[in-house]
Amino acid sequence: MSPTRQDTRPDDTPDERPDGGPGGPDDGAPGGAVDAPSAVTASRSGALDRAAAILGAFDAAHRELTLGALVRRCGLPRSTTHRTAETMIRLGWLDKPGERYRIGNRLFELSGLAPVRHELREAVLPFLQDLYGATRTTVQLGVLDGTRVLIVEKITGHRPMPMLSQVGGFIPAYCSGLGRAILAYSAPEVIDAVVAAGLEPRTSRTVTTPTGLRRELAAIPHRGWAADREEGNIGVSCVAAPIFGPEGQVVAALSVTGPTALVRADRAGPAVRLAAAAATRAYSTRR
């Protein structure tokens, strides 16, 4: 095997010299002097940006990556990626049991401290379990994150549905029961942001017009639950209801999701609504 060549590409230089150039002074500093605190701050910020880019390379479809794949997905130079990844392994942010990188256990430990996991999930989980016991169909808990829904918890039992997002994954808010249950009680600017992000068709049944989406949202408070009728995946339907915080603000939603033949809104809706109401009381009291 030939020795590794040192990468001297210009885009790798800032990793080594946060002072404004390859061996030259910072144009903004008098006489070529560099403000030490500013340089340190810039260096730390750059390191965090690189670590964030590497973490962003992983998702539900890319849980383990070779160095080459990691370079392609994070967009950093190869030497920078390797050097940063080695530091992240030392910190426990990444793991590399063989030739592939994966998310480290330290991040899993820290994720359990996030309020959405520690407080919301623990308060709602018993009601998710009750709902699953009553329906024997996949149940999910999600929160709005920008224009998407983050899946916080999911119970599938013996009928897994691989087409659904895993815990920690995202689904569109505009065409999912979870998203609509939250959006129906959200501020107008939140809905506007979702519309502005685009209403791309996921299936032939997806509502793709702002008027159609707003009509769907307006009907939700009256009946108490939202519905997704094969709008995200053909053959899969969802019924969801909102969960509220102690001040009456919508904080999450829970849902029943499964084959369309088994998930009928008129049957599942009342059970989902009752489960969400009980979860609301538990969450509000807990806080």
Image (cartoon, rainbow, N blue to C red):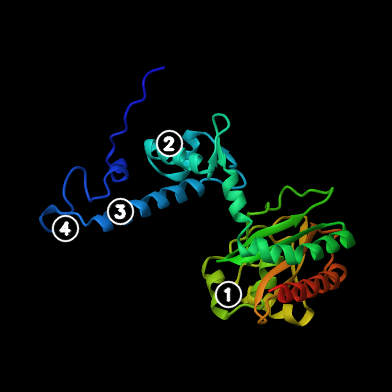
Graded by Cα atoms within 10 Å as few (under 14), some (14 to 19) or many (20 or more), the crowding at tag 2 reads some
Q: Along the polypeptide, which appears first: circle 1 or circle 2?
A: 2
Q: Along the polypeptide, which appears first: circle 3 or circle 4?
A: 4
- Which tag is nearer the camera, tag 4 or tag 1? 4
Residue type indicated by callout 2: His
Q: Along the polypeptide, which appears first: circle 4 or circle 1?
A: 4
Residue 100: x and y in percent read 55, 33
Location of residue 245 with respect to 102 vertically, above or below: below
3D distance between C-alphas at marks 2 and 3: 22 Å
Asked if residue 2 lies left or right of residue 237, the reply is left
- Which tag is nearer the camera, tag 1 or tag 3? 3
The quadrant of the picture occupied by the C terminus is bottom right
Residue type indicated by callout 3: Val
Instruction: For residue 76, say whether it is visible.
Output: yes
Residue 39: x and y in percent read 27, 54
Assign a secondary structure to mark 3: helix
- Observer-nearest residue: 282 or 75? 282
Callout 3 touching callout 4 (CB < 8 Å): no
Q: Quadrant of residue 8?
A: top left
Residue under label 1, please give it.
Answer: 191
Residue under label 4, please give it.
Answer: 29
